Amino acid sequence: MDVGEGSSKNVTESSEIPTIQVGHTLLLRLPSNEIKTLRLEKDSSISLGKFGSFFSNELVGQPYGLSYNIVDKKLKVLPPKTLQEVEDTDATNELISDGQAVQPLKTDEIEKLKKSGVAAEEIIKMQIEQHANFSLKTEYSKEKYKKRKEAKFSKSFSVVVPTLFNVCEYWFNKDSSRLRDIRIDSLSQILNLASIRPGGRYLAVDDASGIVVAGILERLGGRGRLITICDVESPPAYPCVTHMNFKKETTALLSSLNWATADEEYTPIVPPSEPASGKYRSDAQKSRMNKRKMLNTALNKTREELFAGEFDGLIVASQYEPFEILEKLTAYLAGSASIVVHGPNVQIVTNLQARLREIPTYLAPAVSEPWLRRYQILPMRTHPMMNTSGSGGFILHTIKVYDDPKASSVVAHRLKVKKARVESDMSTTPTPSLQDSSEPPVVESKPVDIKVSSCEE
Amino acid sequence: MWSTARTVAEGDLVIVWLTRDVIQPLVITSGKELNTKFGYYRHEDLIGVPYGSKIGSRNGKGFIHLLRPTPELWTLALPHRTQILYLADIAFVTSWLDIKPGSRVIEAGTGSGSFSHSTARTIGPTGHLWSYEFHETRASKAKEEFTRHGMSDTVTLTHRNVCKDGFTVTDTVDAVFLDLPAPWEAIPHAKTALRKDRITRICCFSPCMEQVQRTVTALNDAGFTEITMYESLIRPHQVETLDSLPSIRVANVQLKESEARREAKRLRQIASAHRDGLTSSSSGGGKRKRGDDTTPITDLQQPKAENSTLEVAEDRIPEKRMKTEQEENVEISNSQTPLSKAEDIVIAVDSITPNDSSSSESHQPINVSKAFPEVRGHTSYLTFAVLLPPNYIPSTTTSAAVTSTEATPEVDTTTS
């Protein structure tokens, strides 16, 4: 038994610490809990509106995930916020009536204070001091009040770490329809079901802003291959990938074909990469032609790669008819490859399942729905969030298998035996049907299906 | 980890898929046989066959599918030593903890190795997993299994009670996953094991809310922040193909038909009783004779009642298409003759039934789905938190973090 340090010696030494760099696309969480996204430029000023502005260089070289206060356009790291125990008191809202004017400090006066450079904490303190009913509030309510005011006046922000989780959550909260309802739990399940691993080779159809592509590239970690099929002429913009701030070697694994260039029958029409005269008119033309040549070669290589097949998995999150996509791409998958299809509507996924289960190439297609619930975690105030996402879409998972029409099912076998028995009962002569191998099996590939339907009932 | 070759070889671990509910692991060993209720198979016959193949049994009693193992299939096929983690939780935890190729992860306890296999796959050969199990037999079984699955380089398994003795590494890992009865006891040790040069993450997996509360307090005391909690489940759906839904028009026609039949029977009975009264009272059973119906109805009330019933019936189905309407008219015109026979009515109604259903266009089969009646309703609460790199954070009186390292320099504002 291995005790002690284990095989930590096998571990490659401390990879470089990921830090914020010029050119990264950042997600900044504001006190209001809104997220602002921006590309970090050198020597510029970043404005967060009423939450202040600061010099961009302040962030360069910082690790992701810290919170800052803005003081004179400079950043001061904030200590992490810990949970504060709230003392329970007898206070209730019994004597607090709605609509009563309790705050003598007026908006314009607060604005004046802000302009004169009074710190947020000071303003909040003043507001509390002048609040008519503050002392009547429960401790919970007091804390809520302070928090609300902080969200309004404090000049601070934090840099969201660009993990797959955070990037997916940001996009999902911003516009779930652009992600085709791929919530982070859905995405996690998709990536696991497709068994994405470093070194694997995958196909994907991603009309979900590139969140699937981002997930696959992240899990490949710079080793393996990803070919996506898209519906645009030039390589598609996968905006989610931008937020991951991947290194070059990570994104280099991705190549894209479109529904025309992914067609084996089709010969892509490409502009000539050699001058008609056989001579370059200028250096500019030469470099243009060389560029074209490289693109054409790359395109042909990707096509050949796709057509050679033996990919380890396929993920589809597309607006196009999924059955057609599978019909087209399943041929390029290796045996036992996982196929995962996500869709925002149960009907589409359901219809796909009904069609796939008739085809022996698809093993046991199953439909499932991810379900997620987040909780508020506060001392004595733990409960599920009052508002939550209603749907993360629907997932179909199946495995590509090679059918063998000669492999008869147990049902066919029973029918055969029964038939033979009945026949031998009727006539004393032995029936040849049991041994007759030329006789086609009565039922093909049914027992699994039967099993499937029986366990679904 | 497992074979990535196209075909099955001697010594490979394969997943034998019998049905959706019967999935078992198998190590290919020449000379051995596999006996199932779906026939028997010789291991030799499986060597050289491509992964994903359907194999017919030698005795024709069925077939199997030979699949390449994945952590997800392994989770369905593995021998249970403990309650295991399933896809929904494993996948979600992997994402939240930012486990990816190259990650260094701690897991305690190992249990049946469901999470270990998934993590080993995801971190790949450049990552490392330290797995701890306090139950000696389970630990040695898991160790054997990891070796057999070619995971020894990626996974270090240690038999140890981490709550008492802590972990074997310091300032090393990116993420800690605690699936322990009392995770709060291991949290200070986890903090020691987590690396301090970057943001790191922890997840505690507990089925009970009381455990969560103690965990949250321990995390807070140890200086973890952004404490949050989730529940993640999968609702499996069953898909059925329905042969279109029954139409109320069919029900309507059937009801009319049975109503008319009942009415006809009543009329026959009245007629028969009437005739019996006229002739003799001793013709028992005579009322059932067919010939009876030929007797003209003399009771004046009968035709009236008949008319009104049919008029109501017509009112109920105003949206019928032309074709059926015409038939209806035939029917009605038949019945409108006050002296029509009861039998005619029955025939008329009968005749519209087949036409009605054949003219209905909505005869498309439809695929429907619904969640299974009984599903997994709870696995565990997933409590997450992050540990910020202490070297970058100014020490404060509020954070109990042991940042006794030099007075935090204000590097943050002076970094170029």
Image: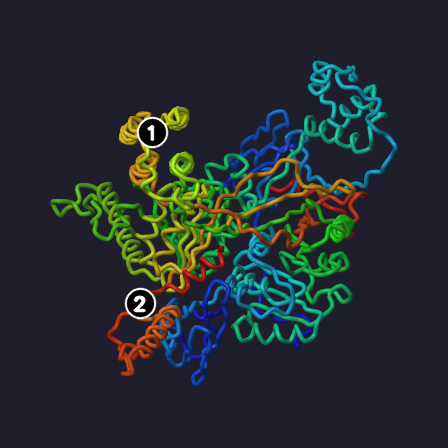
Q: Amino acid at mark 2?
A: Val
* Residue B116 visible, this orientation: yes
- Viewer can see residue B261: no
Image height of A240 relative to A132, above or below: below
Q: x%, y% of residue B164?
A: 78, 66
Chain ID, mark 1: B
Q: Quadrant of residue B346?
A: top left
Label 1 sits on a secondary structure element that is loop
Residue neighbourhood size for the residue with mark 2, other residues' Cα within 10 Å, grouped as few (<14), some (14–19), many (≥20):
some
Toward the bottom, the furthest residue is: B31
Residue B190 drawn above or below residue A85: below
Of A6 and A363, nearer the camera is: A363
Give amino acid for label 1.
Answer: Lys
Return the residue nearer the eye: A399 or B372.
B372
Q: Is residue B309 above or below residue A14?
A: above
Furthest residue in direction left, as rendered: A277
Q: In the rendered image, which quarter contains the C terminus of chain B?
A: top right
- Looking at the image, residue A301 sits to the left or right of residue B118; the answer is left
Q: Is residue B411 above or below residue B136?
A: above
Do the residues at pointers 1 and 2 share their chain? Answer: no
| Residue matched to label 1 | B320
Which disc, if any, is residue B102?
Answer: none
| Residue found at x 66% / y 73% | B138
Q: Name the residue rendered at 61%, 31% in the picture.
A: A54
Secondary element at tag 2? loop
Q: Which residue is mark 2?
A: A442
Write down the chain letter for disc 2: A
Tell me residue A99's x, y (percent): 75, 16
Residue B333, picture quadrant: top left
Q: Position of residue A293 (x, y in %)?
A: 24, 49
